Amino acid sequence: MAKVKHCNALDQHGQLEQIYAVDTLELVLESTTRGVYVDDDGDKIIFNGSNLSFNGEVIVSGRLNGFKFVDSDGDTLISVTNGDWIAKALYNALAGPNEIRGLLTASYASKDQFQGSDKGDIIYGAGGNDRLTGGKGEDWFLFGHGDGRDVVTDFDAVGGTGKQDFVRQFSNDFHMRRSGEDTIVDFGNGDTLILLDVKRSDVTLDDFMIF
Ligand SMILES: [Ca+2]
Ligand SMILES: [Ca+2]
Ligand SMILES: [Ca+2]
């Protein structure tokens, strides 16, 4: 289970894709436990692991247990720990056509835990049954086809401007039902989003946006 922490510096709608020029990433530090990549304006991706080895820019072997996005000011944007991945597979996902999104989708493929910052975050659990906590601010929870049975622990359906949370989902073909104190958003085929301690009557279609 990876633990993913979004930090304040990423701020509202933090799109790593807009921050990182993946084509320009260069490996600037390598060891058996670490690989540090920097893009052309100084934003870093730091991989941590064991038995790592490199061939040019490429990680060719070893395991990764986490990685961190650190911007050119030295502020951590997202920190991922407690994972266990084949290092080459994650490197290949980053080097593939979907770049950052590919890396995140590959890393978040199983059951993980997400903690948002005090500001607005975009939180994407990807595959597996994830536990998602947005924290303060206006948070967006992304949910795609095959993303499992995810739980949002602090969904704010009534907060108003600056606090309200939203779901960004792959399909408008879902139904909602009450389950005890919770609201279940059911997309069928095992894809469900559970909004803990949220009243069914507080959730409206305004809380959703298809992507
Ligand atoms: Ca996941
Ligand atoms: Ca937040
Ligand atoms: Ca999931």
Image: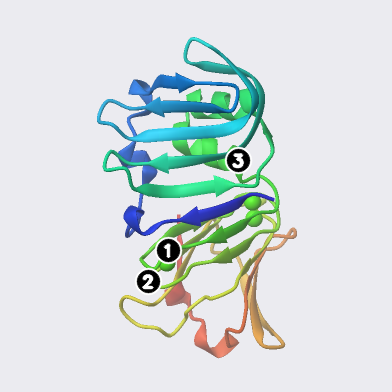
The residue where tag 1 is placed is: 117
Q: Is residue 49 shown left or right of residue 142?
A: right
The local secondary structure at tag 1 comes to: loop
Q: Is residue 92 shown left or right of residue 57?
A: right
Asked if disc 2 is less than 8 Å from ligand 2, the answer is: yes
- Label 2 CA crowd tier, 10 Å (few <14, some 14–19, many 20+): many
Is residue 144 visible to us here?
Answer: no
**Image coordinates for residue 181, horizontal then vertical, percent:** 67, 88
> Image quarter for residue 175?
bottom right
- Going by the numbered disc 1, the residue's amino acid type is Ser
The residue where tag 2 is placed is: 137
Q: Indicate the quadrant of ligand 2 in the picture.
A: bottom left
Is residue 195 visible to us here?
Answer: yes
Q: CA distance from mark 1 to mark 3?
A: 20 Å
Image height of 127 relative to 175, above or below: above
User: What sort of colour scheme is used for the picture?
Assistant: rainbow
The local secondary structure at tag 2 comes to: loop
Residue at 39% from the left image edge and 68% from the top image edge: 118
